Image (cartoon, helix red, strand yellow):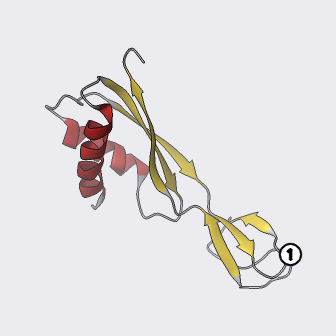
């Protein structure tokens, strides 16, 4: 369950960026290709923030679908299955252009 160590790292990042201000929510974007389970991440967040100044702070997860771009014909497509093949020209020369991200995108702060 690597989500626990991820949440521990997030805790430090949130503390640093909040700079002593009260945090109401943390927004994160997680790509579908990341091996992070959103429900597990949310649960681990509640564990690492328990009995801290961030206890009760909501973790809001936005899932980002995996998207590829064909290097041959330039076609972009969302992946409906784990087949990295262009739906137009059937080329397997594709780049993953979305779906591998993991970002803390913003903090909702009290009084801001």
Question: Relative to the observer, which residue lies in front, 42 or 7?
Answer: 7
Residue located farthest toward the top when viewing the structure as drawn: 111
Q: Is residue 84 visible?
A: no
Q: Quadrant of residue 84?
A: bottom right
From the viewer's perspective, is 92 left or right of 99?
Answer: right
- The percent coordinates of residue 46 (x first, y second) are 26, 38
Q: Quadrant of residue 102?
A: bottom left
Above/below status of 61 relative to 109: below
- The percent coordinates of residue 40 (x first, y second) are 34, 50
- The residue drawn where x is 27% and y is 31% is 19
The residue wearing badge 1 is 88
- Badge 1 element: loop
- The percent coordinates of residue 59 (x first, y second) are 38, 37
- The residue drawn where x is 21% and y is 37% is 49
Q: Is residue 64 visible?
A: yes
Q: Quadrant of the C terminus?
A: top left
From the viewer's perspective, is 65 left or right of 30?
Answer: right
Q: Quadrant of residue 108?
A: top left
Above/below status of 54 relative to 96: above
From the viewer's perspective, is 8 left or right of 61?
Answer: left
Question: Relative to the observer, which residue lies in front, 107 or 76?
Answer: 107
- The percent coordinates of residue 103 (x first, y second) are 45, 51
- The residue drawn where x is 54% and y is 49% is 63
Q: How many marks?
A: 1
Question: Relative to the observer, which residue lies in front, 85 or 103?
Answer: 103
Specify few, some or many for label 1: CA neighbours under 10 Å numbering under 14, 14-19, or 20 or more: few
Above/below status of 96 relative to 30: below
Q: Quadrant of the N terminus?
A: bottom left
């Amino acid at each position: 369950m690597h989500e626990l160590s991820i949440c521990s790292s997030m805790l430090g990042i949130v503390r640093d960026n909040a700079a002593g201000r009260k945090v109401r929510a943390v927004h994160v974007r997680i790509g579908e290709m990341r091996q992070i389970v959103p429900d597990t991440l949310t649960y681990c967040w509640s564990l690492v923030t328990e009995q801290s100044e961030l206890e009760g702070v909501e973790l809001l997860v936005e899932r980002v679908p995996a998207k590829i771009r064909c290097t041959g014909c330039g076609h972009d497509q969302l992946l409906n299955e784990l087949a990295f093949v262009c739906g137009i020209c059937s080329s397997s020369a594709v780049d993953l252009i979305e779906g591998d991200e993991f970002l803390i995108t913003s903090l909702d702060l009290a009084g801001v």
